[in-house]
Image (tube, rainbow, N blue to C red):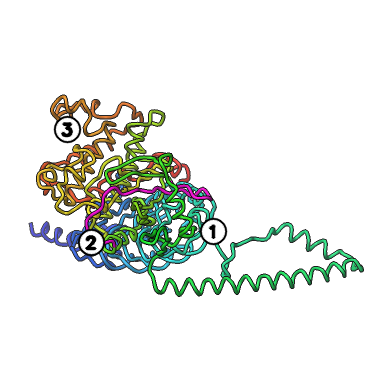
Amino acid sequence: MEMGTVACVIFLIFTTVFCSDSCFALTQDGVTLLEIKSTLNDTKNVLSNWQELDESPCTWTGITCHPGEQRVREINLPYMQLGGIISPSIGNLSRLQRLALHQNGLHGIIPNEITNCSELRALYLRANYFQGGIPSNIGKLPFLNILDLSSNLLKGAIPSTIGGLSHLQVLNLSTNFFSGEIPDIGVLSTFGNNSFIGNSGLCGRQVQKPCRTSLGFPVVLPHAESDEAVGKSQLHAVPTKRSSHYMKGVIIGAMLLMGLALVVILSFLWIRLLSKKERAVRKYTEVKKQVDPEASAKLITFHGDMPYTSSEIIEKLESLDEEDIVGSGGFGTVYRMVMNDCGTFAVKRIDRSRKGCDQVFERELEILGSINHINLVNLRGYCRLPTSRLLIYDYLAMGSLDDLLHENTEQVLNWSDRLKIALGSSRGLAYLHHECCPIIVHRDIKSSNILLDENMESHISDFGLAKLLVDEDAHVTTVVAGTFGYLAPEYLQSGRATEKSDVYSFGVLLLELITGKRPTDPSFVKRGLNVVGWMNTLVKENRLEEVVDKRCKDLDAGSLEVILEVAARCTDANADDRPTMNQVLQILEQEVMSPCPSEFYESHSDHS
C-alpha cells in the first residue's frame, strides 16, 4: 500500500510539472481572446466567464467555434456596452469568419491586423467611436460579404482595395467623416448613395456629386496616350518659320486663357466669400419670394448638397399638379418633382398641421432633417407656400412595400428580398428608438411607410410626422392609424404611443412579409381574427404551409422559424414582454443574415 501511495504521489507531481502547460492549457485562440479582453472595458461584466483556467473558449459568452474544432469562428458581442479598444491580437484569430461588435462604446483605430483574419465574412463595427481610417489592406479579405462601419468617427479616403472584394454584398460606410473621391472600380461601382450617406466630404458617381479641384472647377483628367503621342512627335519635329508663328499664337492664346482663368477665379472667390458670410449668419438656406404684398414663399433646406437654387426649387414646387401625384398617405398627397437635369424628389403636401407658431414647427422639422441613416428616407427640405406646406424627400424608384407586395402582379418578392427588407426596416426603427436623442416613436409603422430603392434596401418614411402634425389631444385611432391591423392593443385603448407599440407594428409587418396578406385581409375578418390571431392558430395546429405566401418559391425553413418566433414575440399582448428593437435587430442579424453561404465554403475549400 505504501508503494502504491508513493507511486500516486510521483504521478501527481509528474503531471503537475510536465502537463500544466500542455495537458490542460487554454488553446491559442483562447489566449488571444484573453488578450483582446484585456484591452476592453467590460462595464456590464459580460465577459466574466472568459477564464484562463478553461481548456477551451468555445463556451464563452459571444464565442462560437468551428464544429469539431477548437478554433474561433464567430465573436458576437453587440449591444454589450463594451468600451476600450480592439487589440491588434485580433489578427491571430486566423479562422475568424464573423466579428460583430456594433452598438458599443469602442474607440481608437480599427487595427490593421484585422485583415490577417483571411476567412472573415462579416465585419460589424457600426455605432462606436472608431477614429482613423479604414485599414489600407482591407483587400486581403477575399471572402468578406458584409462590411458595416457606419456611425463612427472614421475619416480619410475610401480605399480602392475595397473594389477588389468580389464577394461584398453589403457595404455601409454612412455617417462618418470620409472625404475625397469614391473609387469607381470593382464592387465599389455597384453601391449607391445609401452606402455613403452622411459623409459630406465624399464625391464621385456613387453619391451623384462631381469632384472638384482646390479652385472649385470640375476635375478634368488629361488623356495620357494623346499627350505621350504629342510628346514623341515634338521630339522629332524640325523648327520652321511656320512653327515659330504657331508657337507665338500658342503663347498669346495661353496668356488670354490665363487672364480669363484669373477673372473666373477672382469671381469664384468673391462669390464664395459672400456665401461664407451668409452661412455664418444662418444654419440653413432661407429664401423669400414675394407673391403678393402680404404673402411669401419660404424654403428651408436641411442638407447642403442639393445642386439647385432656391428659386429653381420653388418654381418646380409651385408647378406641381394632379399629373405629378404618385400617392397619398395619412398626412397628405405625395407628388413626384422632376428637376430640369432629371433629378427626382418626392414632395408631400401636408393636409394638416399641429396648432402653434411656424417657428416652433420649423425648428422641430429641422431636427428631423438632421437625421441621416441608410434605412430612413432622407428629408431634404421644407417649403411654405401661401396656400400649402410641402416636405421634400429623396425619391425612391421602387415605391412602397405595400405596392410591391400587394399591387404589383409582375414582380414577386423572393424570400431573400423579404429578409433583406425586414432587416433594413428593423435597423431604421432601432435607430429611431435607441440612437436618436430624444428618441422618436414612429406611431405608424406599416408596409406603405416602407419605401424601397432599386437594390431592395428598405427606407422608413414619415418618421416623426405623427407627433409633429397631430394635436396632442387628438385621439390616435382617428388620426394616426393607417389601418387598425397594425396597432397594438394598448395603443388602441389608451392612445398613448410607445416604443413597444412600434415593436408590435413591426411584428405585424413581419407577418405581412411572410404571408403576403394585408393585416386586414377579408379571410381573417370572416373568422373574427386579425393576422396575429390567424397566425397563432395555424402555428398551434402545425399548418405552417398555409402561413407562407405561396408565391415565395425560395423559402428557407430555418429562417422562417426564426422570423415567426420574432413576430410572435413582437406581437405579444403584454407590451412588457415584447423585445426592444435593438434585441429584434440583434436576432435578425445573428440568426437570419449570418453570411456563410455554401458557395463561400466551397470556394474556400478549393483554395485549401
Name the residue carrying label 3.
530
Residue 192 location in percent, x, y? 46, 50
Name the residue carrying label 2.
438
User: CA gap, disc 1 to disc 2?
Assistant: 35 Å
First in sequence, mark 1 or 3: give its number: 1
In the image, which residues are magenta? 337-358
**Residues under numbered marks 3 and 2 in contact, where contact means CB atoms less than 8 Å apart:** no
| Amino acid beneath label 3 | Asn
Quarter of the rendering occupied by the N terminus: bottom left
Does the magenta run of residues contain 64? Answer: no
Does the magenta run of residues contain 355? Answer: yes
At horizontal 28% and vertical 46% (from top left) the residue drawn is 331
User: CA gap, disc 1 to disc 3?
Assistant: 51 Å
Badge 2 crowding class, 10 Å Cα cut-off, few under 14, some 14 to 19, many 20 or more, is few
Name the outermost residue toward the front: 293
| Amino acid beneath label 2 | Pro
Task: Give the side of residue 58 with respect to residue 208, left or right.
Answer: left
First in sequence, mark 1 or 2: give its number: 1
Comparing 592 with 14, the one in front is 592
First in sequence, mark 3 or 2: give its number: 2
Name the residue carrying label 1.
210
